Amino acid sequence: MPVIMHVDMDSFYASVEIRKQPSLGRVPMWVGGDGRGVVLSANRLAKEWGVEGGMPSSRAKRLCPNGVGIRPNFEEYLDASRTVMEIFRTVVAVVEVASIDEAYLDATGALRMWGSAEAIGQRIRRLVREQEQLPCSVGIGPNRLVAKMASRAAKPDGIFIFYPGAHGVQFLTQYAQAGLKGQIPLYQVFSIDAITLPLQKELALGTLGAQEWVNDLPNDANKKYVADFKKKHGVYPSYYGAQSYDAIMLIASAAEALKGDVSNKDKVRAEMKKANFKSVRGGFKFNTNQFPIQNFYIQEAVKDPEGMMTVKTIATAMKDAKDPFYEKCPMK
């Protein structure tokens, strides 16, 4: 199984400046100057004010009047980058530099030495922090695209593993064999559910994740769906099954409202947008960009009273959550 890592130096230019002058970490700051120029990097406090990379420095100053703009020192950033890339090479042999602040690592051949993908990622983060006093986020997956997605989820200064399907089963085995279970908390998305749990078994116990649907949500539609599915198949339905069921019921609600006449696609879309059906995830409605406004739940892998591996809801992470980019979408 390939183990690809994407290591992204968090707010790299800003982090280098904070390393040199730690007091900058306590105020909103960005690299790019106060007046003319473009924001190249911003620290977390500046981002909370809406300052983003690529925006004019003058706009950053308007958004955050008390923020500090620093002129860039590219030679210093290049030196820090070279040192960080060499640190990567002390852990993993195959390092492909993607830019001054990111690299792809093929860690497949390093598993035998370090034990697991997570152990390698944690070692890289620790060495970079100890030797260069810089934060980095590590994304791990079976290919470059997934690793890149995972590193975005890991920000800031974290590690995120995305191994769906069979990869998720193998990763969890490595995680336990390396002695990390019970030592380093594991958070997952789409890697532990009704599809993989029959293979992962007790190795998955206690693992946390987050989704908009869990099989124990206490609404009538979900209770019936889960009970009927278990009665017919003898197992719990997966997230994908619930998602498909909702999609079918949504389409059916539109067809029923139109008395079976689905020839006018505009009318079909208008009826579907109403979401006039009982969803297994509970109440939801479509936002202006057609993404659902819905709850997200924290779930934990457990054994049910019959000894079957499943997941249960332990908390509501977000209530009536909206896609964070819906205001930028031209659909209204």
Image: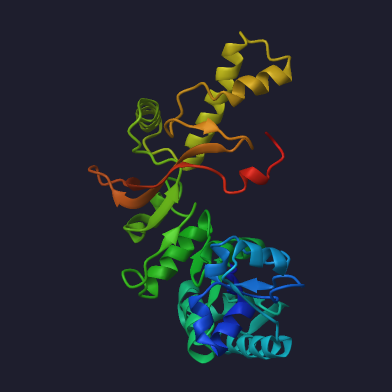
Quadrant where the C terminus is found in the figure: top right
**Which residue is depicted at the point 69% across and 70% down?**
39
Residue beneath the point at 66% across and 85% down: 81
Q: Name the residue: 54% across, 88% down.
A: 21
Location of residue 305 with respect to 222 vertically, above or below: below
- In the rendering, at what x and y percent does residue 174 appear? 44, 70
Question: In the visual, does 192 lie left or right of 303?
Answer: right
Image position of 327 with respect to 143: above or below: above
In which quarter of the view is residue 152 placed?
bottom right
* Residue extending farthest right: 36
Q: As drawn, is 310 to the left or to the right of 54?
A: left
Determine whether 42 is above or below 297 in the image. below
Residue lying furthest top: 259
Name the one closer to the observer, 141 or 288.
288
Look at the image and tell me in which quarter the N terminus lies: bottom right
In the depicted view, which residue is nearer to us: 308 or 84?
84
Q: Is residue 30 left or right of residue 225?
A: right
Residue 216 on image: x %, y %: 34, 38
